[in-house]
Image (cartoon, grey):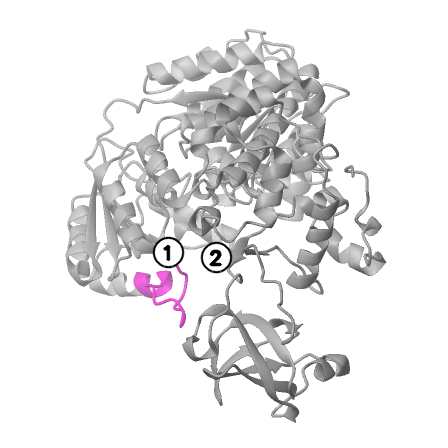
């Protein structure tokens, strides 16, 4: 059996069934073997009907006492089975005449289902079942029953039958083990065919807890291989990119020096170090692939602007992509402030621009008259044509997929030449995780805040003490400072009893006479939202009530108090980002986390982390422990998130060995790399090619 043997080679698999299997990513017999169980059920023993409890999933056996078709609201088949200790109803809404005959009175059946409370006692709805010959010794199930990912029109029973047929064909000589023994031996990992047999048919004595937690050696073996495939895919992307010609930007034109001379402050040592790393990359003839990590307020945007100077000095263009229009507008404002006095044109390209302004902006980008263009995903839409795009800056990488930043890179292609890429994130990522999730990128860290930045004091307060928080806002505003009040919803919801932004703004305006209260949320028109932010930044609004649209990008040094409502419902990364909106000036700042009791253990721990540290890297480390990599990486945005068995948080201890194995495989067994990628990533070498 090889990867090329189609699944239609199995008996009973026709065109219709093959189509349903295709929806699960199954094309070949080998694909069936790698359709791994989501969980397991113990059907190796039956439960007496008299012992069955509501909510219990169990295997039972009994004789059909009654079988009838009823029309109680809808047509249904009801069967009553008994085993001497009790009785159970089997209820079927979809059934055939053959199925009805097969469940006639006197027939003995073995069923598996979840016990529910019904009109006549406990019942199973649409259970899995099979007939049992009472005169023969029915062979007991000798392994735990796997539950597979499924799709419409494909039952678990049929899937188990197909996987069983694939296992029966499995010969260790036919299944390529892409990992050489030299890599497996130090890890004490089982061979591939042994691991697959175990996972599809685990014996009754198998440690069910280890299997459910995906920590069994057989699962670890496959997780290691999957992590290795994803890591290699990114390393190979990096190699491919570095074979393409880029824009060597080493023409000193003095723009950087002029920009620095106009700043009212000096760069930190960390900013200078990271800028030097970027400039060394930009001077090369191959495209830069570098990520800047840095905590909120460390000055990443300025480093990006200084990096842009190299492209502008060479007469080329720079594009900056931000995840939201609000953040794009903030960047455009900063870049215009820095570059307009130096004669460089900066344009904003947003989805909600008027047609005339959009046409003018696109014409400036296409002609090259616009040197710096800033926008959201609108930057890589079809109508945008660059004249000479040499540098692409992507802010808040975890908000974008690999596809999206590669699409922007392709937009800037001129012949074979590709632009440099600078990726920026204010979500610090632990080094080992970054090396795996972003193996195609070099990583620079700005680990120093500008002088004079005092740590933000964080306090956690129950909702009952809300009046104290309102008084603190009054005091801050009377002292000439400003404040944020962040709510999770825009208007009241019957399902989620959170304080809504609009109601909160009205209530606070009433409670704080003389304090100018503004409101910004995601459903407002872009112009109204921008006007609200401008009013707040200019000091005309003293208290800004907002949803989490202000999570990133808003820079108001006079704001010294951040209040976050229902903080127990937010993730650590988001809370840390919101807290970073204050403490950006020279005044002492505070962040108040209001929670609604009772707190879950996870929420209590999250809030304790925020109270204990302002260090974004420590927050990220704890976030990884508490919630996994999704909060750090954007779970649906990176290829790494779509894994079948591996998990970056659970399997983090394997990542250093994965990185070492990748180097060894590329150096000593390069012929095994392509089959490994085909097995785990398939046609989704999505990282290397776009569109």
Q: Quadrant of the N terminus?
A: top right
Q: Position of residue 454 (x, y in %)?
A: 21, 30
Q: Position of residue 658 (x, y in %)?
A: 52, 26
Q: Answer yes or no: is residue 409 visible.
A: yes
Q: Answer yes or no: is residue 23 visible.
A: no
- Label disc, if present, on residue 630 of the rendered structure: none
Give the mark count: 2
Q: Label 1: which residue?
A: 519
Magenta stretch containing residue 306, yes or no?
no
Instruction: Residue at 30% x, 54% y: name it.
Output: 568
Start and end of the magenta stretch? 485-505
286 relative to 471 in the view: left or right: right
Q: Label 2: which residue?
A: 524
In the image, 289 versus 687, the foreground residue is 687
Q: Quadrant of residue 456?
A: top left
For the residue labelled by badge 2, is the local secondary structure a helix, a strand or a loop? loop
């Amino acid at each position: 059996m090889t990867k090329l043997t189609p699944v239609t080679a199995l008996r009973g698999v026709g065109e219709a069934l093959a189509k349903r299997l295709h929806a699960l990513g199954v094309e070949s017999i080998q694909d069936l073997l790698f359709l791994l169980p989501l969980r397991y059920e113990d059907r190796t023993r039956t439960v007496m009907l008299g012992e069955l409890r509501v909510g219990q999933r169990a295997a039972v056996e009994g004789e059909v006492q009654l079988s009838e078709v009823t029309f109680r609201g809808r047509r249904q088949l009801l069967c009553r089975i008994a085993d001497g200790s009790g009785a159970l109803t089997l209820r079927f809404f979809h059934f055939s005449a053959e199925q009805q005959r097969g469940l006639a009175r006197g027939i003995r059946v073995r069923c598996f289902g979840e016990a529910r409370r019904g009109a006549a006692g406990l019942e199973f709805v649409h259970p899995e079942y099979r007939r049992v010959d009472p005169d023969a010794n029915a062979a007991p199930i000798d392994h735990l029953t796997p539950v597979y990912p499924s799709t419409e029109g494909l039952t678990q029973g049929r899937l188990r039958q197909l996987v069983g047929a694939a296992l029966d064909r499995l010969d260790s000589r036919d299944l390529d083990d892409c990992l050489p023994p030299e890599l497996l031996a130090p890890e004490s990992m089982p061979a591939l065919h042994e691991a697959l047999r175990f996972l599809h048919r685990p014996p009754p004595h198998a440690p069910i807890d280890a299997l459910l937690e995906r920590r069994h050696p057989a699962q670890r073996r496959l997780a290691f291989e999957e992590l290795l495939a994803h890591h290699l895919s990114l390393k190979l992307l990096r190699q491919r990119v570095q074979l393409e010609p880029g824009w060597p930007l080493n023409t000193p034109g003095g723009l950087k020096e002029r920009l620095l001379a106009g700043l009212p402050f000096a760069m930190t040592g960390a900013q200078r170090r990271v800028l030097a790393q970027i400039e060394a990359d930009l001077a090369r003839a191959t495209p830069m692939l570098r990520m800047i990590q840095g905590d909120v307020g460390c000055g990443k945007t300025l480093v990006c602007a200084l990096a842009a100077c190299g492209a502008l000095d060479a007469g080329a263009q720079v594009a900056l992509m931000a995840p939201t229009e609000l953040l794009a507008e903030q960047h455009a404002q900063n870049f215009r402030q820095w570059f307009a006095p130096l004669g460089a044109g900066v344009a904003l390209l947003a989805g909600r621009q008027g047609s005339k302004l959009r046409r003018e902006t696109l014409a400036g980008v296409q002609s090259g008259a616009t040197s710096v263009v800033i926008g959201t995903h609108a930057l890589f839409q079809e109508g945008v044509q660059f004249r000479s795009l040499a540098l692409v800056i992507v802010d808040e990488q975890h908000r974008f997929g690999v596809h999206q930043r590669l699409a922007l890179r392709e937009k800037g292609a001129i012949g074979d030449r590709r632009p440099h890429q600078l990726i920026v994130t204010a979500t610090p990522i632990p080094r080992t995780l970054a090396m795996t999730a972003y193996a195609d990128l070099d990583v620079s860290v700005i680990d120093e805040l500008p002088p004079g930045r005092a740590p933000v004091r964080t306090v956690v307060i129950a909702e009952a003490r809300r009046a104290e928080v309102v008084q603190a806002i009054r005091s801050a505003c009377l002292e000439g400072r400003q404040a944020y009040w962040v709510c999770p919803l825009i208007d009241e919801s019957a399902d989620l009893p959170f304080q809504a932004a609009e109601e909160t703004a009205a209530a606070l305006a009433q409670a704080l006479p003389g304090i100018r209260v503004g409101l910004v949320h995601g459903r407002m028109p872009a112009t109204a939202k921008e006007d609200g932010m401008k009013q707040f930044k200019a000091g005309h609004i003293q208290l800004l009530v907002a949803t989490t649209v202000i999570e990133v990008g808003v820079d108001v040094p006079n704001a010294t108090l951040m209040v976050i409502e229902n903080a127990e419902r937010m993730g650590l990364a988001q809370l840390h980002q919101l807290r970073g909106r204050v403490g950006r000036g020279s005044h002492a700042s505070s962040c108040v986390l209001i929670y609604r009791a009772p707190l879950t253990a996870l929420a209590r721990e999250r809030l304790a982390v925020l109270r204990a540290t302002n260090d974004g890297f420590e927050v990220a480390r704890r976030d990884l422990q508490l919630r996994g990599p999704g909060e750090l990486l954007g779970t649906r945005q990176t290829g790494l998130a779509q894994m079948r068995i591996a998990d970056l948080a659970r399997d983090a201890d394997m990542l250093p060995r994965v990185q070492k194995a990748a180097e060894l495989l590329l150096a000593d067994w390069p012929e095994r790399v392509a089959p490994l990628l085909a097995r785990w990533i398939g046609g989704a070498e999505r990282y290397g090619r776009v569109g």
